[in-house]
Amino acid sequence: MPAFTASAPGKIILFGEHAVVYGRPAIAAPVSQVKAKANVTADPKGTPGNVRIHAPDIGLEASLGDLPADQPLAAAIQGVLTSLRVKRAPACSIKVSSTIPVAAGLGSGAAVSVAMIRAFSAFLGHPLPDETISAMAFEVEKLHHGTPSGIDNTVVTFTKPVYFVKGQPIETLRVSRPFTLVIGDTGIASPTKASVGDVRAAWQANKAQYEAYFDSIHGIVDSARSAIESGVIELLGPLMDANHGILKKIGVSCSELDTLTLAARKAGALGAKLCGGGRGGNMIALVSKDRAEAVAAALKKAGAVRGIITEIGK
Ligand code: PMV
């Protein structure tokens, strides 16, 4: 039996994180420079039904049956078996690896789920369609995040920039003029579940104020959408700065993210903001192509552990 391999990219949220959990739109795009990969091989000598999972990046090596049902990798595989009504899979081994930093706002959990679901369903002879893969990865996202919006699994599955509203059919975004971003990593692991939970507590304590923040973000997202679709990329910089300012008020920035966004602007970025859950993880800066290397260098000097240059809409 041949090996079945699938991969899925990382993702960044360009605009609208956190507000998206409360029904507002967000814009996100895939980042192909980092990816998760899953490889499934048959184990002809193994006991039928025995599915081994190896994920050296997180030090995991176990049989599916020995993992708790809420372990995210096990849940992804179990989801495929349930959906395809497979009682006993052929003995096999699933190897998962990823270059996407974990708990960093780049969608690593969703990418791992999507790669595993895609490769394992193909191995079982029933490659699942993208809609189903995304829906299944969303179920796993709930284990990671608590109350996810679904944006990560959507972008990572369909690998296109999207204008996303929770619970609505996906709208892919037409990027009239590709644009360049530098992604700077604070190196601080920050589980999204914690920041999403804290925002929920703050929203519960002061609904009027938080709803107003989310409405402001909604306006920014819609302006950004027009700018992207009409190719007036210069408008995106100030919109990023404004979005970062509100995220700061919401309480999901941190001194390291503020330092990196400032350093990017000083080095010539047109705008910058944290991206994803916040409190660590990554930030993004909009740059002209010829300033990308200089901004990436400035971010490293200001403490970033990694700088990725990516082009959106290419
Ligand atoms: O940190 P990430 O990349 O998983 O992004 C989380 C985005 C949030 O809006 C904060 C949560 C969500 O589920 O959309």
Image (cartoon, rainbow, N blue to C red):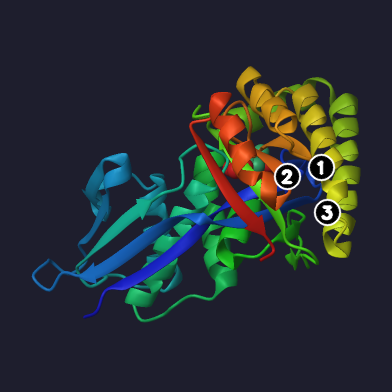
Which residue is tagged 3? 233
Few, some or many residues within 10 Å of mark 3 (<14, 14–19, 20+): many
Image marks 1 and 2: residues in contact by CB distance under 8 Å: yes
Residue 118: image location, x then y, percent = 44, 69
Q: Nearer the viewer, residue 292 or 128?
A: 292
Residue 103, compared with residue 245, is above or below; it is below
Q: Please tell me whether mark 1 sits on a helix, a strand or a loop.
A: helix
Quadrant in the picture for residue 186: top right
The quadrant the N terminus occupies is bottom left
What numbered label is drawn on residue 237? 1
Residue at image location 74% in from the left, 53% down from the top: 166
Residue 313: image location, x then y, percent = 69, 63
Residue at image location 50% in from the left, 55% down from the top: 33
Which residue is tagged 2? 286
Q: Please tell me whether mark 2 sits on a helix, a strand or a loop.
A: strand
Quadrant in the picture for residue 293: top right
Image marks 3 and 2: residues in contact by CB distance under 8 Å: yes
Residue type highlighted by circle 1: Gly
User: How far separated are the C-alphas under marks 3 and 2?
Assistant: 9 Å
Q: Nearer the viewer, residue 167 or 285?
A: 285
Residue type highlighted by circle 3: Ile
